[in-house]
Every structure is written in structure tokens, then in C-alpha cells.
Image: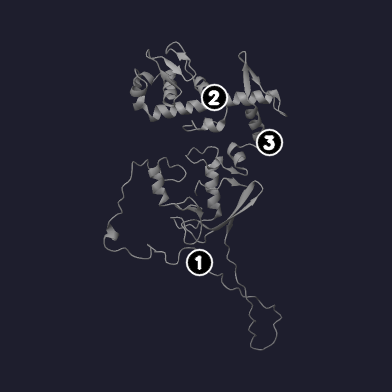
Amino acid sequence: MSKNLLRKSLVFLLAAVMAFAVFGCAPKTPDETGEPTGAEPTESVAPPKEVEADVPADRYDALATPRTGNNASSPLVVSTGTLDGKFNPFFATSAYDVDVYGMTQLGLLYYNKDGAPEAGIDVPSFAYDYSQEIEGGTSTYTFVLKNKIPFSDGEIMSAKDVLFSMYVLADPMYDGSSTFYTMDIQGIGEYRRQATMDIIEKVDSILEAGYEYVDGEMGMNPVPGVSEDDQKAVWNYIDQAGARFAQSIVDYVYNKYPEYIPSYFAPYTQADLVDDENKKIAFGMVMWGFGDLDDDGNFVDSLGNVYVFGEDEVSTEVYWENIVGAWGYDLDDINGEAAALEIQD
């Protein structure tokens, strides 16, 4: 299923084409005596009509046609860039992996060279047809799915498989590259955050109101219908989540780019960082553009604070303060810094 589903959705109605059985009646054959038996006449049922697969009439069937010559023994060889080996539409991490799974997966819709969605029997899409109804600020999309389209194991696909894909991409623990869960689909935010809409709206109103520091003290701007205790709870939770968010970036950078330490974190080497969490965090901040080292090997964060290793602590809370300093509490902008987890996770 493609992540490029249309952005304004109220509900998906996934309609599979059904086959209807045809019934007919025939008179009961009388017995040899011609006397009535008293039994009620029975109804004979015609076998259900065979549903044809919705595929092009001239489609080449590679399974039904034996291979000959070089096609029987020689593999197809293509050239590509370095592959990560994640040929999965949910978790592919490189454009080259996407190219591979694009040749083996079928999307709900097909996007042509102009980026326009298409569906139809002659189109490489799971949808046979689709329609859009716009009312006010919402759109309702209806998809008619193709009959008898199998997976590679022979199992026939259905609307449940489309929904499964959506649930995976919207799952709270999903950590792939798709941003399907950010689309404005009814209920997707509640599912992703595992919270009701009234709680989500309350949190959003608190974030929108924001807060200001006065003489070093946090002053929260009032929010109609929200208590001060609730506001404090939200901000405390976000700061705790922010520290975990920062740690996920540090772990990602340290595990992914240790060979960059001598180049971007000189005069230190990987051996200097193995047992030093302060340097690991500082390295993660440097690689993400939130600081640098001065000529004396001290760390200077993006807010201008100087940290002397061995004397000052560089913590994930410090990293989070720098992220907030750059983006405020705009969660969409903050999530642009994500390496693995998003702030909501």
C-alpha cells in the first residue's frame, strides 16, 4: 500500500466485489405410481458463478508458459546502488531498496509519471476503481478492490489486507520511514497516540498556549478549561519524553557513525567515547548540528553554553534544551530531528 494516500480523509470504505449465487427451481420428478407423495417440492441450487480475476486479458502468464532457452537457466541481472537489504514496503531504508520492493509489491493505487493516482484493470493497482466525495472540509474515498489478486503464496488479497497495512503504518511502535500516520484521517491520531480526541485536543491547546520564563521561573499561559496541574503534568511529561527522544538520537549516531568521530569530534577518538556518556551525547549533538568543539576540546552547544569534559555534565536534558531552543515545542519540527523514536513515542 502506498504512503501517498490522499491527505484529507474522513473515512475509507473498502468495498470488495461480491459474487451472487444464482438460484433456480425445477419440478420434482413424480414417482412411478403417479400418486402424490405429500412431500414438499425441493429447490435445486445452481453452483455459484465463477468469479474471474481482474487482470488484463492479454496478461502474460509466466507460470503457465514454460521458459525456454536462456530464460530457463539465466537469471535477470540488473545494476543498482548499495542495498540495505530491507525489501519491505514498511521498513525499507534506502531508495535502492524501494526500487526493489516496487517491482514486487502492489499498491492500492498506482501513481503515473505526473504523480496522479490511477486505478483500473489495466493499471498495476489493487483498486479496480475509486471515487472521491467532498463535503465541507472532508473527503470520503470509496475503493472497489480487484477480484482474485493473490499474494506470492497464493492467498487471495482482501480489504483486510489493506487495513492491516494501514494499522502497521499507524501503530504507536512503528519506526519505519513512512509518515502515513501524520495524514489527516479520522481516528488515526487517537490510534497512534492511544488516546481519545478530547485528551489530544487538550494537550494540543496546552502546547499552543506555550509558556514563558520570568526571572528564571516557568510561567504557563492560561488555557481555557485546563487546570494548572494538568498543564504542569503535560510539560513535565514532554520534557521527560524529550530526554528519551534525545537519547535515541545519541544512540543512533554513536552506533551508526563511529568512524566519523576522528573527523568531526577531534581531538577525540572512538576509544575516548566508549565509557564516557558526556562525550557520546556531545558527539550526537555535534553530528545533528547542535554544537561543536572549541580549540581546547571543550564542547559548545547551540545555545552558546561551554562544557569542560571532566568538570561539566552534558546530559540528554541539555540536548533536549537545545532542541527546544531551536524549534520551541512544535512537535512536527522536533520530529524532523528524529533518528528512531518520535517525541510522541
Quarter location, residue 64: bottom left
**Amino acid bearing label 2:** Val
Residue 277: image location, x then y, percent: 43, 19
**Does 100 appear above or below 254?**
below
Contact, mark 2 vs mark 3 (Cβ under 8 Å): no
Q: Nearer the viewer, mark 3 or mark 1?
A: 3
Outermost residue on the front side: it is 114
Q: Residue at x 66, y 34 (%)?
A: 201
Provide the secondary structure element on which disc 1 rests: loop
Q: Nearer the viewer, mark 2 or mark 3?
A: 2
> Which label's residue is closer to the chain start, 3 or 1?
1
The residue that mark 1 highlights is: 52
Q: Nearer the viewer, mark 1 or mark 2?
A: 2
What colouring does the structure picture have? one colour
Provide the secondary structure element on which disc 3 rests: helix
User: Of the numbered discs in the image, which one, if any, rests on residue 324?
Assistant: 2
Of 331 and 172, nearer the camera is: 331
Provide the secondary structure element on which disc 2 rests: helix
The residue that mark 3 highlights is: 198
Residue 306: image location, x then y, percent: 46, 14
**Does 284 appear above or below 155?**
above
**Does 104 appear above or below 180?**
below
Outermost residue on the top side: it is 311
**Amino acid bearing label 3:** Asp
Outermost residue on the right side: it is 225
Graded by Cα atoms within 10 Å as few (under 14), some (14 to 19) or many (20 or more), the crowding at tag 2 reads some
Q: Is residue 104 visible?
A: yes
Distance between the Cα atoms at labels 2 and 3? 26 Å
> Which label's residue is closer to the chain start, 1 or 2?
1
Q: Residue at x 26, y 62 (%)?
A: 69
> Which label's residue is closer to the chain start, 2 or 3?
3
